[in-house]
Image (spheres, grey):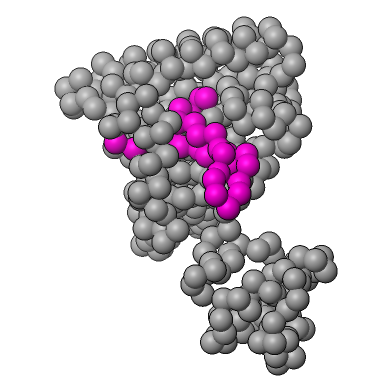
Amino acid sequence: TQPSRQFEKFVEGADWGDGDDVALRWRETPAKPRVWRDFMTVCCEAGEVEVLLGRRQVDWVPASNSSKPQVEQLPIVFWCTQKCPFSHRVHVALLEKELRFTKLDVASGDPAFNMEQFQGLYSLASPDPSAPAKVPMLEHRLEESEDEVRSTVLLDSYQIVMYLERTFPRTGASLLPRNPAQRELIQAFIECFEAHVQAPYFRLRKASDADAIKYTAELLGGLSVLNQFLLVYGSWNERRPKAGAFLNGSDFTLAEVITAPITLRMVVMCQQYRSIDLLKATERMGNHRVHAWMLQIMNRPSVVKSAPDWYRFTQARRELVGMKQRETKFSLRKYAKVKSVPFVLRSVRCFNIDKDASADTDSQ
């Protein structure tokens, strides 16, 4: 297509030295939308889209009837919310597979979120068209034209993860091993986790204070069962724990994708609302295998990056508390030598400073 005269004037008057300046200049220049269409056409033909629009990828393109920036519609659209652990599963799988996708949080007030489109897609994919829309939901656009869009819409988190693994087997990390026996082992591990850990945890969340002790014991017993499963069927070298404490050693598979979001919330919620430190409890009970497994999946980059904001804040607070403990313990050792105060007594007080990590060390 031939560029219009307005486009030629726009090119002559623009500074093409930096792509970010061009993008800002376009938003500030009162030009018609057709100018942007010509600009995009010429750049695509010249193969210089990334050079002219900056170092980062193109995230928005103005619509034909409006100059307001819009989110680029990638082939994969992921509808989710931060609070949902099942949405967290899909988010972890997308990051592990290294796929580009458009994330639409239904509860964050994102201007790109369209409630009518969300409800309409869910009604088409759900067996019950009158059911209220829920997350997670993933739309994979296979063919798109001016008149219609042919896409695949999935609603269940487990089905979505399996669909991503089977549709993109050579992209990113492989979530399923080739050996059929190992695949069945992963399925057995997920069933063991859901029966012995996830179910008691959900009951503990809704339990009263009188029933909390019973469900806590049930949850710790379930973690012992999971520890035995990992010892018998898992791959882990106790002498080399950094080699990998996942079910398949160093391979982060479907077993961790499905169980990591629940485990993350279980550890934080039990500590926050029930005053139960599951990591310390498993270590004291001798369940070192499941203890190492929990630590490694909670520190997985894809799990941390896709976790809710409150989890990242909790991790930062935990690091701050550990730093305060080390500083206070060192200062108390010096104080004990000078003042001849028993260090054992001081170390007990030092260990309880995590209740207020933001307070000053001297006041503690």
Residue shown at 25%/20% (left/top)? Answer: 213
Q: Can you tell which quarter of the image residue 202 is in? A: top left
Left or right, 173 with reference to 84: right
> In this picture, which residue range is highlighted in magenta?
132-159
Residue 12 rendering spot, x and y as whole percentages: 74, 91
For residue 135: magenta? Answer: yes
Left or right, 270 with reference to 308: left
Residue shown at 43%/50% (left/top)? Answer: 105
Residue 303 rendering spot, x and y as whole percentages: 56, 39
The answer to whether one can see residue 141 in this image is yes
Residue 118 rendering spot, x and y as whole percentages: 40, 45
For residue 219: magenta? Answer: no
Residue 240 rendering spot, x and y as whole percentages: 73, 25
The answer to whether one can see residue 54 in this image is no
Residue shown at 69%/32% (left/top)? Answer: 168
Q: Can you tell which quarter of the image residue 21 is in? A: bottom right
Tell how many labels: 0
